[in-house]
Image (cartoon, rainbow, N blue to C red):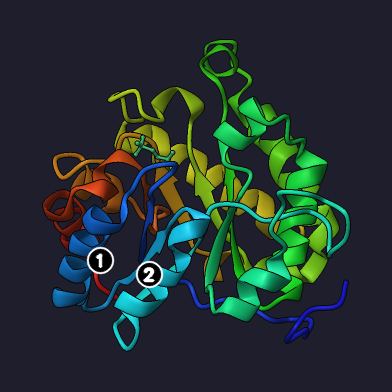
Amino acid sequence: MTTATPEAGESALRQTMVVGNWKMHGALQANADLLRSLRAAPPAGCAVSVCVPFPYLAQARELLAGSQVAWGAQDCSMHEQGAYTGEVSARMLGDFGCRHVLVGHSERRRLHGESDAMVAAKAERALECGLTPIVCLGETLEQREGGQTEAAIGLQLDAVLHLLGAHAARMVLAYEPVWAIGSGRSASAEQAQQVHALLRARVARHGIDAQSLSILYGGSVNPANAGDLFAQPDVDGGLIGGASLQAADFQSIIESAPRH
Ligand code: PGA
């Protein structure tokens, strides 16, 4: 693949990150309040980003300009450009100044039929355009109860690793068990650590410096459970849905993140 800054041996700096996923929520006035409160309390030692709906990217860009808080989108097309009505390309997002883009969120996989191969192609488009893809993966409840967690996330991860090759070092991974998303039932800190360690080991087997990769946990993170989750050695922060819409909760989650 060709990328904006392509070099083999490249790696993103592993860092603590807290990323908000607004999903399909928001309105101009409420967003303005939320974004202003975020920029008023700049994080120290923790990267913070918000992934907002496309129409609000301009608002995020304006209200977060000059702050420590980054912003991005929740999806991009697997295609570079062309007759794909309704799609938004990674190049457009990069052009506009997005830093991050979520790819492969379970809601996209489940509700919009995105396959592992499509998700990998989206991650590749993002890297080509200088964006950091936050690649989401996770098992369903059925898979977990059937002892298939490792196999399920392994397939999702391998598709991305095979396509991106050495460039995979520049992605961020987000482990989001499907059963934990929006359910109020987070994975326990031990469950999260176990899967994060598996993911890191699998990345390392592909010859990538897995110790430099940030792996976030997502799924019902809230101010009460964030500290335990983030204290795990292989959990580098979180991808936060519902709680990222409440300024006080999001701020409190950010404060729970270990500082490096
Ligand atoms: P949640 O969502 O925090 O509301 O569970 C997380 C996500 O879907 O990214």
Quarter of the image where one finds residue 122: bottom right
Q: Is residue 42 above or below residue 190?
A: below
Point out residue 162 in the picture as x, y percentages from the top left corner.
Answer: 84, 54
The answer to whether mark 1 and mark 2 are in CB contact below 8 A is yes
Of 107 and 64, the residue lying toward us: 64
Query: Residue drawn at (68%, 71%), measured in percent from left and top?
Result: 92
SS at badge 2: helix
Point out residue 62 in the picture as x, y percentages from the top left corner.
Answer: 36, 78
Whichever of callouts 1 and 2 sits on the residue coming sooner in the sequence is 1
Query: Residue drawn at (24%, 72%), measured in percent from left and top?
Result: 259
Quarter of the image where one finds residue 229: top left
Q: Quadrant of the C terminus?
A: bottom left
For residue 110, say whether it is visible: yes
Of 258 and 238, the residue lying toward us: 238
Amino acid at the residue labelled 1? Leu
Point out residue 116 in the picture as x, y percentages from the top left corner.
Answer: 76, 39
Residue carrying label 1: 35
For label 2, count other residues whose C-alpha is less than 10 Å away and answer few (under 14), some (14-19) or many (20+): many
Residue carrying label 2: 60
Distance CA(mark 1)–CA(mark 2): 7 Å
Q: Is residue 125 above or below residue 63?
A: above
Quarter of the image where one finds residue 251: bottom left
Query: Residue drawn at (16%, 45%), measured in percent from left and top?
Result: 223
Point out residue 113 in the picture as x, y percentages from the top left corner.
Answer: 73, 29
Amino acid at the residue labelled 2? Ala
